[in-house]
Image (tube, coloured by chain):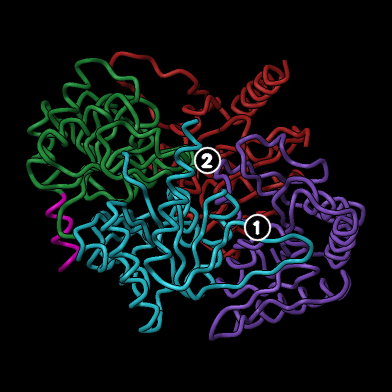
Chain colours: A green, B red, C purple, D cyan
Amino acid sequence: MDRPYIAVIGAGDATATQQATAEAVGRAVAEAGAVLVCGGLGGVMEAACRGARQAGGTTVGILPGSDRAEANPYVDVAVATGLGEARNVLVVRGADAVVAVGGGLGTLSEIALALRAGTPVIGLDTWDLARPGAPVDGLVPVDGPAEAVALALASAAARRQSGRD
Amino acid sequence: MDRPYIAVIGAGDATATQQATAEAVGRAVAEAGAVLVCGGLGGVMEAACRGARQAGGTTVGILPGSDRAEANPYVDVAVATGLGEARNVLVVRGADAVVAVGGGLGTLSEIALALRAGTPVIGLDTWDLARPGAPVDGLVPVDGPAEAVALALASAAARRQSGRD
Amino acid sequence: MDRPYIAVIGAGDATATQQATAEAVGRAVAEAGAVLVCGGLGGVMEAACRGARQAGGTTVGILPGSDRAEANPYVDVAVATGLGEARNVLVVRGADAVVAVGGGLGTLSEIALALRAGTPVIGLDTWDLARPGAPVDGLVPVDGPAEAVALALASAAARRQSGRD
Amino acid sequence: MDRPYIAVIGAGDATATQQATAEAVGRAVAEAGAVLVCGGLGGVMEAACRGARQAGGTTVGILPGSDRAEANPYVDVAVATGLGEARNVLVVRGADAVVAVGGGLGTLSEIALALRAGTPVIGLDTWDLARPGAPVDGLVPVDGPAEAVALALASAAARRQSGRD
């Protein structure tokens, strides 16, 4: 129970560059001994799981449908929720920090839900958010996978520490 | 069952201007004979319900908690979901079109979930979204409540028509 | 907000007798000025809504799917949850008391979830529950619709009163 | 992805006998190479996880709250849903078969939801269900943990096979 949980979010239809980024993120998450949580499907999710498994990590897929067989082949533990897009809430709710790769609308909903819950989000080639009258705290754009995971883990550690104080 | 359902989304802590806007939106929704759906709490949600009730409309509040008493006093039908922020999915899922007023993070999650489901979103003083490589379709900024509701109703009618064809 | 909410639960494929019972329950709920909440589909749900509408009442249908058009024609306010059977939780969560007609498995899950939340359940021709070592409190079998609704309303009033004290 | 998933359900406040039974069930699930899914809390859930971990198995806890720290210490992968009792749906939805130990009301809701989804339920000292007019298929009472798990695995294998045909 003491391992950090890092959610990696991103679209099911991702570019080759985004998939390579996600795979590197997954590998770094696993190398740090953290659990990788994702939406369990293809694209960014599959690439992240593949990277994590290559490094011997644990991968969790929170699926929108009711059939575990929808999970990509690199998911260790599949949770078939049957909740549709409401499962996005679960992907980020249980994570200590989130890494977003690329820019789908499902990803945007997960970024918003994470920030709303006070969970830090590290962004790689993702949404640029602007709203009238108030800055957006908690979404930090970075340039590469290693930096993203290092920052996610540091944020997770700081949050877990402050939760204990 | 033939009335359109319009979701009005916005933060619980809203400025006086946003609340005045939301109240005008709610009134226009009711005057058009549409059902107003919202998150059932204060701020933009309460103002929109108040406006709708003044015009004799029906208001539905989809609450995050388990206690119906959390609903604002202008909610006709309160649904106490106990789902927390996962109730955001329900606020937009059942609507034919969405009007967003102002820019909270919960609102952003609802905008993203609506666009993801193909539901049109009309924005009043709300998020400006940008992502790498692809435009954001479906989020239409307008200048005033009357225009917002007219556009929401036209979008809703077009969607319902195409659903029947 | 001061009207009691009574959930009427029962199977989509119900006998003619169960439907007649449900219709009488719906009518009595409406005549008492209470809001009728149900799962929004056919069988017991449709019959209860029809009875309530004949008496001028308000009916709410909490649907498992994402399409409002699945609601039976006597539903005033349809909530398309897209949550599948998880919507059963919502049907009973927001009610002050529950009337169960007949004995489907979805109905059994709703009875259990209601009792678990401390919500009284009045049963008409429904499940007979027995478990080892402890009695089942809160499930009260009665003989007819009028008695069922009277008892549901009295239980709801007692609960609401104790919630205020 | 080829391991069967067996849900073990039962109350958080369980007798010593029920906990010993659940521990034996968990051990047998792990020895068979299956993933153990449960609600992640104490009592039957904790005993089943403890048994599974002693045999080197994988345990998944689907929690009602938003805080992973609520999981019992024998949970490998904790999913903090924040959905309250709606998480019961998730506990059984993703399982190939269910073993019920003892007789709480949450357990009863899970039995009903599993049977409703066509998932076989093996019962150890659990609810005795009776309804008017139709037998209850799918709930099989057995006498001991070994028999329960053997039957759960056989049912799971039969279901998975028929799903492939």
Circle 1 is placed at which residue position? C105
Q: Along the line of sight, which residue is nearer the eye, B149 or D17?
A: D17
Q: Which mark is residue B9?
A: 2
Secondary structure category for the residue under label 1: helix
Whether residue C146 is visible here, answered yes or no, is: yes
Residue type, numbered disc 1: Leu
Who's the residue at 57% across and 49% down the image? D118
Q: What residue is drawn where x is 15% and y is 54%?
A: A3
Q: Main secondary structure of the magenta part?
A: helix
Q: Which residues are magenta?
A: A156-165
Give the image location of residue D66, x and y in percent: 35, 58
The answer, for residue B13, to whether it is visible in the render is no
Amino acid type, residue under disc 2 in the picture? Ile
The answer to which image quadrant residue A54 occupies is: top left
Q: Chain of mark 2?
A: B
Q: Residues within 10 Å of mark 1 (few under 14, many from 20)?
A: many
Q: Chain of mark 1?
A: C
Question: In front: mark 2 or mark 1?
Answer: 1
